[in-house]
Image (spheres, grey):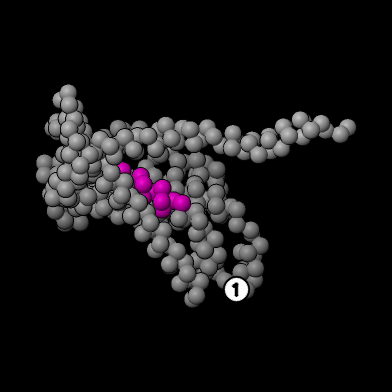
């Protein structure tokens, strides 16, 4: 039966509009919960927006100018980057190694694959309590182990590098298994014929891993790196819970582990209630995430090109 002109037009219109209608819910939700808050935060950052005041005068870039000269802000940036490096780099390397082990023939392989995800579903508060006890200055298990080898105990809450290491260990414990499962899923998509051919050519497992597995995992490695960068630079709950006590939002008595998100919360809400200044901190954090994520992707691609030429 030959379609009528009206039916033909509706059919063509359906072919053209249907894809846009299918993806429209994502863009609507992204505009409502992504673009609008981002734009509103930028607008608020241009005002002296005291939450306790009725009027919010426009001040232009004054908040950003004050922020660039704020020593506490740069201290939070340093803490954020320090914890990020100590947590993200070991986390991704360990996740890659775990995924490689779980991709091999093991007994109870499914149980091991499920087990590495248990830390990720554990309550953050419970994790913070346990790690707070492990890294306690007086009765912590870590200082007790250091004493067995003749080393002095560390004040994990009052020492800057010590607090970085403690928080990074907490983050690694929670998120390594999550990244390992992503790497494992990508590894299982690699054709087994490549490994069999390499084995026939005399390549050992280590050589197969670096010459076959890692190059083919490049898109997945970039994805995990970007996701870990976003999460690592937005770190809030772990250092906050680790410093639970008097005014934990400061990240220790001398702000030893206060991250940018903690500093943003301190200014935007209690005790300062300066929403405009806190919004400026949020936008500086956004720019920091973009710069670090772009740098990480560039480094991965550059090292991949060098490896290909080698």
- Farthest residue toward the front? 5
What span is colored magenta in the figure? 223-236
The one of 42 and 286 positioned closer to us in this rendering = 42
What residue do we see at 40% from left, 62% from top? 298
Q: Is residue 32 among what the camera can see? A: yes
- Farthest residue toward the bottom? 310
Is residue 230 covered in magenta?
Answer: yes
Indicate the quadrant where residue 30 lies: top left
The one of 300 and 130 positioned closer to us in this rendering = 300
The one of 233 and 32 positioned closer to us in this rendering = 32
Left or right: 166 in relation to 36: left
Asked if residue 130 is positioned above or below residue 149 in the image, the reply reads above
Q: Is residue 143 among what the camera can see? A: no
Around disc 1, counting alpha carbons within 10 Å, would you say few (fewer than 14), some (14 to 19), or many (20 or more)? few
What residue do we see at 41% from left, 58% from top? 297
Indicate the quadrant where residue 55 lies: top left
Q: Residue 5: where, in percent of width, then height?
A: 79, 33
Q: Residue 304: where, in percent of width, then height?
A: 47, 66
What secondary structure is marked by label 1? loop
Indicate the quadrant where residue 192 lies: bottom right
The one of 195 and 87 positioned closer to us in this rendering = 87
Q: Main secondary structure of the magenta part?
A: helix
Q: Residue 203: where, in percent of width, then height?
A: 57, 71
Quadrant of the rendering where the N terminus is positioned: top right
- Farthest residue toward the right? 1
Left or right: 271 in relation to 85: left
What residue do we see at 45% from left, 72% from top? 306
The residue labelled by disc 1 is 202
Q: Residue 285: where, in percent of width, then height?
A: 28, 46
Is residue 75 covered in magenta?
Answer: no
The number of numbered discs placed on residues in the rendered structure image is: 1
């Amino acid at each position: 039966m030959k379609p009528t002109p009206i039916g033909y037009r509706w059919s063509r219109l359906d072919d053209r509009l249907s894809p846009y209608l299918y993806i429209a819910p994502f863009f609507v939700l992204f505009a409502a919960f992504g673009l609008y808050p981002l734009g509103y935060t930028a607008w608020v950052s241009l005002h002296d927006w005291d939450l306790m005041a009725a009027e919010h005068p426009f001040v232009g870039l004054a908040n950003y100018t004050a922020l660039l000269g704020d020593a506490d802000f740069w201290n939070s940036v340093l803490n954020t980057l320090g914890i990020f490096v100590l947590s993200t780099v070991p986390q991704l390397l360990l996740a890659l190694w775990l995924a490689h082990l779980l991709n091999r023939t093991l007994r109870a392989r499914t149980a091991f694959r499920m087990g590495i995800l248990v830390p990720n579903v554990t309550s953050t508060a419970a994790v913070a309590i346990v790690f707070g006890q492990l890294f306690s200055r007086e009765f912590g298990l870590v200082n007790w182990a250091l004493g067995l080898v003749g080393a002095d105990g560390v004040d994990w809450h009052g020492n800057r590098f010590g607090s970085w290491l403690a928080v990074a260990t907490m983050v690694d414990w929670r998120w390594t298994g999550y990244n390992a499962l992503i790497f494992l899923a990508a590894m299982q998509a690699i054709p087994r014929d490549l490994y069999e051919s390499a084995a026939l050519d005399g390549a050992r497992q280590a050589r197969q891993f670096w010459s076959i597995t890692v190059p083919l995992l490049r898109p997945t490695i970039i994805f995990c790196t970007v996701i870990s960068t976003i999460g690592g630079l937005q770190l809030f709950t772990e250092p906050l819970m680790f410093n639970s006590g008097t005014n934990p939002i400061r990240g220790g008595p001398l702000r030893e582990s206060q991250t940018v998100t903690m500093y943003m919360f301190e200014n935007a809400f209690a005790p300062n209630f300066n929403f405009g200044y806190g919004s400026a901190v949020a936008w500086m954090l956004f720019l920091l995430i973009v710069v670090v994520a772009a740098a990480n992707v560039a480094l991965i691609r550059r090292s991949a090109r060098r490896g290909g030429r080698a």
